[in-house]
Amino acid sequence: MDRRPIIRLIRTASAVIFVASIAGLIVSSINGNNEGWVLSIGMVSAITAIILVVASAVASTTRHPDFSDVLAEGIEDRIQRLVAAGADEAEVREIARMSVKLGRGL
């Protein structure tokens, strides 16, 4: 699912709300500095900022490299050659697993 249009909509709506909040704060200050209005507008602006931060964090994706069947077959062939040469298969496969974990940063 492509999230870019949704994030673009959230960012645009947030920008509109931020501009409206600034205008609302100015208008409420001019009209007698009503604390209720100022707090309400400030809370709406703060909630919008939180929504924007969460949406941006959720939408950011880390691309993982595509799985390569050719590379996987090459690794399997090398494991088979090592086993045929006398290496312990369980030990060689454990080294391969640990290498994958290291590559993933786990």
Image (cartoon, rainbow, N blue to C red):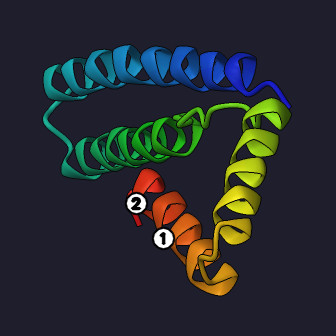
- Residue at the (32%, 23%) spot, across then down: 24
Residue labelled with disc 1: 98
Residue 82 at what x, y percent from top left?
A: 63, 63
- Residue at the (34%, 25%) spot, across then down: 21
On screen, 58 above or below 97? above
State the mark number for residue 17.
none
Left or right: residue 77 versus residue 44 is right
In which quadrant of the rendered image does the C terminus lie?
Answer: bottom left
Q: Nearer the viewer, residue 74 or 57?
A: 74
Residue labelled with disc 2: 102
SS type, badge 1: helix
On screen, 90 above or below 21? below
In which quadrant of the rendered image does the N terminus lie?
Answer: top right
Residue 39 at what x, y percent from top left?
A: 26, 50
Q: Which class describes the residues within 10 Å of circle 2: few (<14), some (14-19), or many (20+)?
A: few
The amino acid beneath tag 1 is Met
Label 1 near label 2: C-beta < 8 Å? yes
Residue 70 at what x, y percent from top left?
A: 81, 31
- Residue at the (73%, 27%) spot, across then down: 3
The image quadrant of residue 10 is top right
On screen, 88 above or below 38? below
Numbered disc total: 2
Q: Which class describes the residues within 10 Å of circle 1: few (<14), some (14-19), or many (20+)?
A: few
SS type, badge 2: helix
The amino acid beneath tag 2 is Leu
